[in-house]
Image: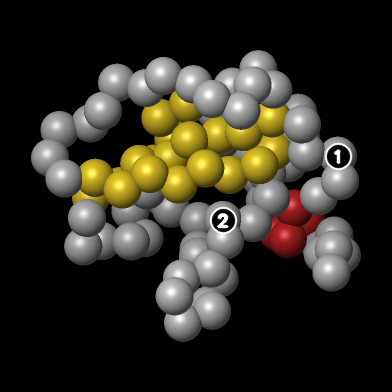
Amino acid sequence: MASDTDYGVYAGPIGDFTAHVPVVCSTGGATSTSVVPPQGDVYYLVVPNNEYLEGVYGSDRSGTEISAGPTRCFPRATDMGCPTEP
């Protein structure tokens, strides 16, 4: 969304691409941050947000939108019935 000025970082175990959980909910608007890596082989997902909602998680290689994991930093904009930007 155009109002996204911050980022959350999620991590999940390689092989279960629906199990990502928040590692950092805000970078304070910075485009980089440091995280303590979880144990094991993990993937990271960076998600844009503003102080109320988070944006989409991107798409997998087949073009399917990545779904939210079991916990989130903020409600997703698409969960709120907001229109998506082209």
Q: Earlier in the sequence, mark 1 or mark 2?
A: 1
Quarter of the figure with residue 65: bottom right
Q: Residue at point 86% right, 39% down?
A: 3
In this image, 21 relative to 74: left or right? left
Query: Label 2 sits on what residue type?
Result: Tyr
In this image, 43 relative to 84: left or right? left
Q: Mark 1, residues whose alpha carbon is within 10 Å: few (<14), some, or many (≥20)?
A: few
Name above or below for residue 69 compared with residue 4. Answer: below
Q: Nearer the viewer, residue 31 or 36?
A: 31
Identify residue for label 2: 57
Q: Residue at point 46% right, 71% down?
A: 60
- Judged from the image, the secondary structure of the residue bearing numbered disc 1 is loop
Name above or below for residue 85 compared with residue 39. Answer: below
In this image, 64 relative to 81: left or right? left
Image position, residue 4 (x, y; %): 78, 38
The total number of labels drawn is: 2
Residue at the outermost bottom position: 62
Is residue 26 visible to us here? no
Query: Label 1 sits on what residue type?
Result: Ser
- Judged from the image, the secondary structure of the residue bearing numbered disc 2 is loop
Q: Nearer the viewer, residue 23 or 31?
A: 31
Q: Residue at point 48% right, 35% down?
A: 9
Is residue 24 visible to us here? yes
Identify residue for label 1: 3
